[in-house]
Amino acid sequence: MKTSKLITLFCLSFLGFANNSFSQITLPEVRVLSLNYKYLKSVYDSSAAQPVKLLERRAASFDLKNSEFYEEEYDSYFISFFLPEGQILAFYDNTGTMIHSAEKFKNVALPRVVQVAVANKYPGWAIAKDIYLVNYVSDGNESKKVYKLILENSSKRIRTKLSDKGEFLD
């Protein structure tokens, strides 16, 4: 009887130490920069394509003061961010805050609201090409987001523009 209690106690101790050894996994350090939260709040769209979100997060988290481009004598900087699907030209002041940006993405996945709006207005037409444009200005109320589309139906082509909310602009 004493032996079985001793073995049980040993097993529970072993499991306790084994459990603690697995819980000591360290996660990589995460730095949060709040300089460009206004930019992210203005341009972020949960339904936007993944490359758009990725590049916008990269532009928002860019640390100008610790970059190779920073020199105290300049008042503003423009930095380009590229992916095969698109690019962002961002303008920063000397504190690292984004002043404005011009963004252009080609042939990215369209949000569902834009797809539905096109399908309802142009049944039987297919989206051949799309360009997503975003213009952000820090002292403006909201960023401007436009989808420019080329629609095809056999040999016919139509150009149209929509907002990110699925509203036709032409």
Image: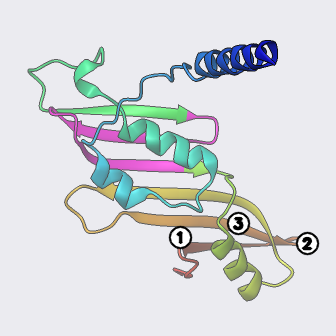
* Location of residue 23 in the rendering, given as x and y in whole percent from the top left corner: 58, 23
Q: Residue at x 46, y 64 (%)?
A: 145
Of marks 2 and 1, the one in the foreground: 1
Q: Amino acid at mark 3?
A: Ile
In-front residue for pair 89/94: 94
Does the magenta portion include 71?
A: no
Instruction: Report which residue position mark 1 lands on.
Output: 164
- The quadrant the C terminus occupies is bottom right
Residue 3 drawn above or below residue 76: above
Q: Residue at x 24, y 41 (%)?
A: 35
Does the magenta portion include 103?
A: yes
Instruction: Report which residue position mark 3 lands on.
Output: 150
Residue range corresponding to the magenta coloring: 83-104
* Location of residue 140 in the rendering, given as x and y in whole percent from the top left corner: 24, 64
Q: Kindly report the distance in space between the C-alpha atoms of the residues bearing marks 3 and 1.
A: 16 Å
In-front residue for pair 122/94: 94
Instruction: Report which residue position mark 2 lands on.
Output: 154
Q: Kindly report the distance in space between the C-alpha atoms of the residues bearing marks 2 and 3.
A: 13 Å
Q: Kindly report the distance in space between the C-alpha atoms of the residues bearing marks 2 and 1.
A: 27 Å
Query: Colour scheme in the image?
Result: rainbow
Q: Residue at x 24, y 38 (%)?
A: 92
Q: Amino acid at mark 1?
A: Asp
Q: Secondary structure at mark 2?
A: loop
